[in-house]
Structures are given as structure tokens and as C-alpha cells.
Image: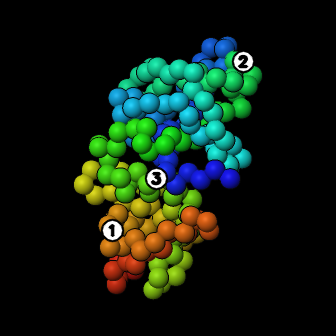
Amino acid sequence: MIDLIDSICLGTITKTHGIKGRVVLKLDRLSPDDILRMELVFIEIDGLPVPFFIQEFEEKTADTLIITFEDIVAEESAIGLIDSKLYIKKNDVRLNNTPNEINQLFNLKGYTVIDIEIGELGILQDILDIEMNPLLKIVNKKKEILLPVQNEFITSIDSKNKILFVNTPAGLIDLF
């Protein structure tokens, strides 16, 4: 199985573009200028990363790209990719605008968050990329928890079991 540990989510395929199998990619955080090269990408299909080779891509707007894949030549084939996440190798993009740790955390959406003292907190639903104060948005059946992204709070990541282990300061979780 392909491991996405050295990749980041570039964005989501939102729709087809024309009838020749081209697609529109909505970029999550990076701009088209941050892409150094895009030859091989991975698209998440049924929860698994599937490799695709890029024939060409062009900037449509400041946060969207039009992509042509090598083996997709008809709109019917491209329709199945709509709403899929597209991943790219980290060394193929410039990450200077966003700290590396934050980029890695965007790939952890859906992970179970466990505090080593308290126990399970919930599911990591989103990372709120607030300048100078990014937050983990953790949701469970009872409440929504916003945890600052601080190196001292995140103790480890278990990618195999999709678990993010944290050690929150005493009393912080009680605020929610």
C-alpha cells in the first residue's frame, strides 16, 4: 500500500472541465505559485491513495488549477474523481508560507484524538489555520474542543491506527 507520510493534501477535485477528462482542483492552503512541479500525484479513492500522472496543469484562479491526467481522456472517467482529495509529495511544493507541522496536521483529519491523561477527546475534524494561532478542531458527541497547535501538546501520531496523542494542560479541556 502507498504511504502518504511524505505527502500533503493539495486540495479537492471539485468538477470536470470540458469533455476531454480535465478536472478543476480547489487548493486548500497553497497557491499555484507554491507548486514547484507536479508530475505524480495521489488521489484518494475509496480511502486508498491511487497514483496518477499529470500531463499538464494550469492556473485557473488564485486558488484553483485545471489538471489534465495522462490516462483520463474523457469526461465520463473524470466524473468519478469529483470530491476526491489530491495529494502531492512535500518536496514538490514550497511550504514556506505555512509551517511544516501545520501542513502535516492537515493530513490527520479524521484521526481519533486521545489525551494521555484524560482519554479519548473525539475526532480531529479540522485544523483552523488562524495566523499565529492555528487550532485543532476536535469534535465528539457532546462538544467541540479547540486545541492550540503547540509542539508541547502533541506527543505522538499513530498513522497505522489513525490516532493523534496529545497531552493538554490541566483544566484546558474542562473549559469546553
Q: Could you tell me if the residues under marks 1 and 2 are in contact, i.e. CB atoms within 8 Å? A: no
Residue at left offset 53%, top offset 20% = 56
Q: Is 130 in front, or is 57?
A: 57
Residue 96, label in figure: none
Question: In the rendering, at what x and y percent does residue 68 appear?
Answer: 58, 21
Question: In the rendering, at what x and y percent does residue 52 appear?
Answer: 63, 33
**Which residue is denoted by mark 2 in the rendering?**
74
Of the residues shown, which amino acid type is indicated by label 2? Ala
Residue 151, label in figure: 1
In this orientation, does residue 168 appear? yes
The answer to whether residue 74 is above or below residue 8 is above
In this orientation, does residue 143 appear? no
Specify the quadrant that holds the C terminus.
Answer: bottom left
Residue at left offset 70%, top offset 27% = 79
Q: Could you tell me if the residues under marks 3 and 2 are in contact, i.e. CB atoms within 8 Å? A: no
- Please tell me whether mark 2 sits on a helix, a strand or a loop: loop
C-alpha distance separating marks 3 and 1? 15 Å
Residue found at the far top of this picture: 19
- Please tell me whether mark 3 sits on a helix, a strand or a loop: helix
Disc 3: CA contacts within 10 A as few (<14), some (14-19) or many (>=20): many
Of the residues shown, which amino acid type is indicated by label 3? Phe
C-alpha distance separating marks 3 and 2? 31 Å
The number of discs equals 3
The answer to whether residue 89 is above or below residue 142 is above
Residue at left offset 38%, top offset 77% = 168
Disc 1: CA contacts within 10 A as few (<14), some (14-19) or many (>=20): few
Q: Earlier in the sequence, mark 3 or mark 1?
A: 3
Residue 106, label in figure: 3
The answer to whether residue 81 is above or below residue 170 is above
Question: In the rendering, at what x and y percent does residue 159 appear?
Answer: 56, 64
Horizontal side of 32 relative to 111 (left or right) equals left
